[in-house]
Amino acid sequence: MASAAISRGEVLHLYRSLLRTARQFCDYNIREYTKRRTIDAFRQNQNLTDSAAISAAYSDGKSQLDVAKRQAIVYSLYAPTIKSVMEA
Amino acid sequence: MATKLLASALRQTLNKKTTSSSLHRCLSTAAALTTAPPSQNDEAMTIKGLKISARPLYLDMQATSPVDPRVLDAMLPYYLARYGNPHSRTHLYGWESDQAVETARSQIADLIGASPKEIVFTSGATESNNISVKGVMKFYKEKKRHVVTTQTEHKCVLDSCRHLQQEGFEVTYLPVGNDGIVDLEKLRGSIRPDTGLVSVMAVNNEIGVIQPMEEIGKICREFNVPFHTDAAQALGKIPVDVDRWNVSLMSLSGHKIYGPKGVGALYMRRRPRIRVEAQMNGGWTREGDKERDSAYAISGGNGRGMRAGEEGDGERLLNGVRAKLDGVVVNGSVERRYAGNLNLSFAYVEGESLLMGLKDVAVSSGSACTSASLEPSYVLRALGVDEDMAHTSIRFGIGRFTTEEEIDRAVELTVQQVDKLREMSPLYEMVKEGIDIKQIQWSQH
């Protein structure tokens, strides 16, 4: 474990990036879920003190961000022509 | 040219600031033109003669669930460059697919407390159930001639049992109580020396009740009878453990838990070893101990989908509906149930009209109109639900991607529709006046 401790700034940046990416999902349910899941996960991990645990959670979040970024594009490519009743 | 347009569209999304709500409609038309399937007009579409202007909110998670984007993300590479056959032993393509299959296998094994060697991939829970019921009985046919199951099993288990009956096996279909739970004493009493299998599903697909798996497992251990369970609706929703339940076989399904369609798994215990006769030849090598060729690619995503944690909450829906309506009955046990599967009957309402009126909510029903048969659901009948109540039953399936706002909207729409139908109903008027409609002698025409 050579990596340095994760700074508060980096964590907040990851959090905001995830929320920003969540908003890019054109699917109502996926968009809301991604937001909810992001908030829940950060809340759940907010009291982590062990630096190994923090960096594990951080790198997990990073890879989830990559997934979300890719999938937001995939979803947009096949977006249905009509919206969910929840947005109509 | 097309690829250029697509690439520029992709770059656009990546760079776009996410302030405007128009983004939700996603991307430039260039992408839509080059990649999307033929698009209808933006405002509405017509399907089955209905003009639909918005996608209904989806509350039919027991039918199938949406694929989790994380699952799709894990699967996509195996539909692109990594298309090898996991059985190809001579090149990279085979090796990387094989690795993906093995990863999926151990993820699934972890979920149910099994060893990866005990997991076989199938085309779905239906195939797993067929292999379990028919495969076990045919393998041990010299000594074992009897199967115990329940009246509320999935169609594919019941049909497999019927098939066995035609071949001379005997089957006991255990009745269930009003709450949909099997009576353990009756189960114990039905086991005979030549019983070769007990098959009871963990969570019922129609009414969501949870059977006492541990207790059934104990009885099976006592009589040394293999225990099979269809856990397609249970995995990811209730704790599943093959040792605590003492199951010898367990059927699992990908698409019920945000995984890929067309992929399932079968758990087959190694100690003590349970053997089955293959139902399909050639796809399985070594007595069916290998996964089917076709399952490999998608199974890369399977384990991910099954790693469920967050699940639906039917309480909110039930409380919402109960707060505003009388004559609402929950079908099946209220205590022993998976909360994301709520089966409700609305008294004095005609089922078909209710479903037609609920066109903004995608739900399923136990009434005749949604299925091929004219009879109401056999599961509800096994519970002893009156025919009129069975005809007005609706199954609400809540899942990982359902929002609280959707549940509230579903409550609002259901209440509205039921109120409207009751207002028109002479039956409801008579009940309000205190007439017992069960006593009415209807004249024949």
Image (cartoon, coloured by chain):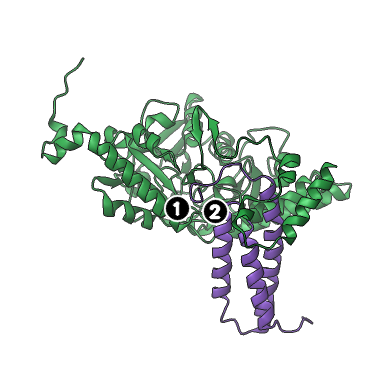
Residue at the spot 54% in from the left edge and 37% down from the top edge: B44
Letter of the chain shown green in the rendering: B
Residue, far left: B434
Q: Which mark is residue A29?
A: 2
Among the chains pictured, the one given purple colouring is A
Q: Helix, strand, or loop for circle 1?
A: helix
Identity of the residue furthest to the top in this view: B445
Does residue B13 appear left or right of residue B227 in this picture? Answer: right
Residue at 67 percent of width and 44 percent of height: A78
Given contact means CB atoms under 8 Å apart, are the residues at marks 2 and 1 in contact? Answer: yes
Under mark 2, the amino acid is Asn
Q: Position of residue B247 (x, y in %)?
A: 51, 51
Q: Is residue B366 left or right of residue A16?
A: left
| Tag of residue B406 | 1
Residue at left 53%, top 61%? B309
| Residue B383, horizontal then vertical, whole percent | 32, 40
